Image (tube, rainbow, N blue to C red):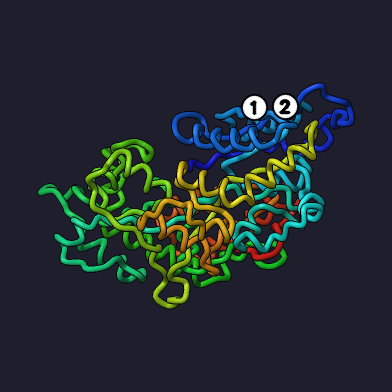
Amino acid sequence: MKRVVLAAALTAVVGLAAASAAVGSRHAGPTKLTVWVGWSAGKELVTFKKVAAEYDKAHADVTLDVVGGITDQKITAAIRAGNPPDVVSSFNSYDVGIYCGTGAWLDLKPFLAKSHISTSIFPKATMYYTQYNGTRCALPLLADTYGLYYNKALFAKAHITHPPRTISELTADAKKLTQRNPDGSLKVVGLDPFIGFYENVPERWAQAYGAKYVDSKGHAILGDQPAWQKMMKWQKALVDWYGYKNLVKFQAGLGDEFSASNGFQTGKLAMNMDGEWRVAFIANEAKSLNYGTAPLPVDDAQPQLYGSGYINGTIIGLPKGGKNVDKAWALVNYLTTNVHALAVLTNGLKNVPSTTASAKSKEIIPDAHFQTFIKVFNNPHSSTSPIMASGQSFTNLVQTFWQNYQAKGSKDLRGALKKLDSQLDAQVKQAGGGNGGGGVP
């Protein structure tokens, strides 16, 4: 799932959003509920519309109009113009701090209480990334979970019998699996650790090291933690082993991440960190690929983290200015808590079901590759990105820092990270807030 930067204009959305239209008028027929989703075409949108049609058929008082291909920018513009849909869904949980902090999405606590729904039905990480500073303006609608994909044929050829569990094993296997051309250029890469390549971003590797972004008060603490330095030095050493320029050239020859010529699918990458959706891509585009899935390897000094992983996912909520709030909430309630609905969505979308009960549903089609990600999702050590007032800009700044480091190195990494902490704190302060509170990653 690609990351999208949300416009900072949402910080003023409360003052710009128009008042909700009156909801007490009588309707001769069923109420039309407009539902905006990110899925744009093909099997994904068809799957969501299938679930929507089931709900529509069972509820004579509403009729659903599902609109696909919606971006955060479109959601923002509609709310600011005072003409939002009844229900909004976003692929981007990074910006919950903006949605909740500005009131752009309604606080769902009163709705949850009225419907007698306990948030304990959702795993802890999802409860963190759907709220900000005590305001829960979203609920999880499926989730993305990250793990390790590995090529079994290449493993067998290299006499490697099992996927790595620790970073030291990962490093040794990556080097053993790498093949070079006669001129020294890279033919097959064991693991590409390059930050910015495919799904490689700091927060997904940070989970493997137990590295934290902020303290309980929302202050950045990257420079105070040995885990960040250890992780970044490991990554830089592996990049240097390949050769920075060699990796850049190798990546230029690979297919786009979301195409049939993805590097892992074509055998150019022996291992790759990726999300659960890759299982569906491989089934559709690389049926003959002999591969396995496993949790991402972890810091050797923290073996208890093995089996956990990085989590984020699609979120859904009620926008400020919606006209049919009660009926819209009933739909959100169904989509996010009904075990059958979540199972149908999981089977069609190949995203992880987002309640504890739905993860155990017998309706979910058995798939050993996919089951890995369900287990990772429900691991108590799994975590997510920090939810901050500055939204995705917070983690983007860390990623830019790391990309500069992997290219040029640093004589004083701790000192550089301390300066980054100051920049992060200043960014959040300018945005007008702190962290989302509770379970801060």
Outermost left residue: 182
**Amino acid type of the residue that numbered disc 1 sits on in the rendered structure:** Asp
| Residue at 88% across, 29% down | 22
Q: Is residue 178 left or right of residue 15?
A: left
Please say if 325 is above or below 65: below
Q: Secondary structure at mark 1?
A: strand
Residue 417 can be seen, yes or no: yes
Residue 412 can be seen, yes or no: no
Indicate which disc, 1 or 2, sits on the residue closer to the N terminus. 2
> Residue 243 bears which disc, if any?
none
| Residue at 66% across, 37% down | 58
| Residue at 81% across, 31% down | 16
Q: Nearer the viewer, residue 334 or 11?
A: 334
> Residue 32 bears which disc, if any?
2
CA distance separating discs 1 and 2: 7 Å
Q: Looking at the image, do the residues carrying marks 1 and 2 touch, with CB atoms under 8 Å apart?
A: yes
